Image (spheres, grey):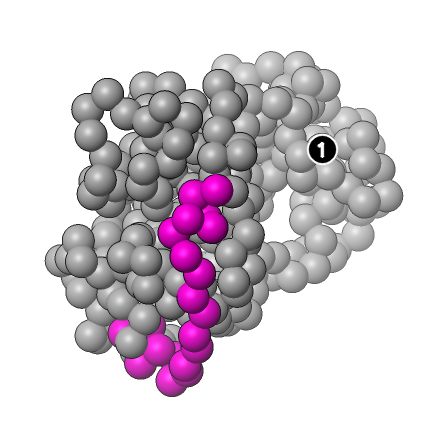
Amino acid sequence: MNTKMKIAEFFNFSTKNERIDWNEVVHSQHCGDINKKCIKVRKSEPSVSIGTCTVRHGKDNQSVIICPHRLIEKRRIFLDCIHLLTLHEPGNELHVIPEIAIPGGSVDYFLASVRENRAIDFVGIELQTLDTSGTIWPERQRLLIDLDVLEGAEERFGDKSYGMNWKMTAKTTLLQLHHKIETFQHLGKHLVLVLQDHLLDYMKKEFSFAHINTIPKLGDPLHFHSYKLGLGDDNNYHIKLNERLSTDSAGLASAMGLKAEAKIGFELIAKTLNAKISDKTLLAI
């Protein structure tokens, strides 16, 4: 196997794992994190899933996650937010509800404490991974040749490669948080940004994070949960909570030198959550 391969993880499996039947993996196009076909498809071929979860980048060949769904592994990111449900009580159900719109945009997921089909408390959860510049497709096809899934010469896919949009990803992410955090702070609720350790480290270097709480405070509305990706005993990658930070809207504004204001009532968000609560959203433990 080519040790210079730039794709580290393909359809949830490490490309270093020699026990994988890659022909079956590519045929099924299954994503284990969302438990269905990978929804990251090629625009010109919507029936073909790209399947690239993690790439190697930089002189140190860091394994950088590029698919947000990769962060949902075993749904542990939701379990790591339960302590922020300050009104949760024994007997309540936990539900994970995707895509809820609030002022400033939509939130990827809400973890809700539910009693008798009514949301009693909730935590907003945003997922962020690195965006790539250029196309990952040539690297994907070269990988398939190296894995003996595709026949042909690697050169026929040209020498185009991808880059990592560190600056744009970090700036856009913090701006989006800034637009939303006022709402959560006004309600006394929490918003959590889930990201990989590499991206959080970049934010610390490029923005003013010196005043951000390294010992998270439950009273802060904004929390950063960073996860490290490492190879497990099964020779596949797994995520593990690495670091937690917290701040409020003023702290985030100070980091970026910005201001924003957006407020909405608890009942309005709860009404939207209640309408989407079902057996499918129940968080199974």
- The stretch in magenta equals 251-271
Q: Amino acid at mark 1?
A: Ser
Q: Is residue 253 magenta?
A: yes
Position of the N terminus, as image quadrant, is: top right
* Residue 234 in sight from this viewpoint: no
> Residue 93: percent from the left, percent from the top?
33, 24
- Relative horizontal placement of residue 39, taking residue 240 as reference (left or right): right
Per the image, the residue denoted by label 1 is: 49
Secondary structure of residue under mark 1 = strand
> Residue 222: percent from the left, percent from the top?
30, 59
- Relative horizontal placement of residue 250, taking residue 262 as reference (left or right): left
**Height in image: 104 above or below 43?**
below
Total number of numbered labels? 1
Q: Residue at x 36, y 23 (%)?
A: 116
Q: Residues within 10 Å of mark 1 (few under 14, many from 20)?
A: many
Q: Residue at x 27, y 57 (%)?
A: 188
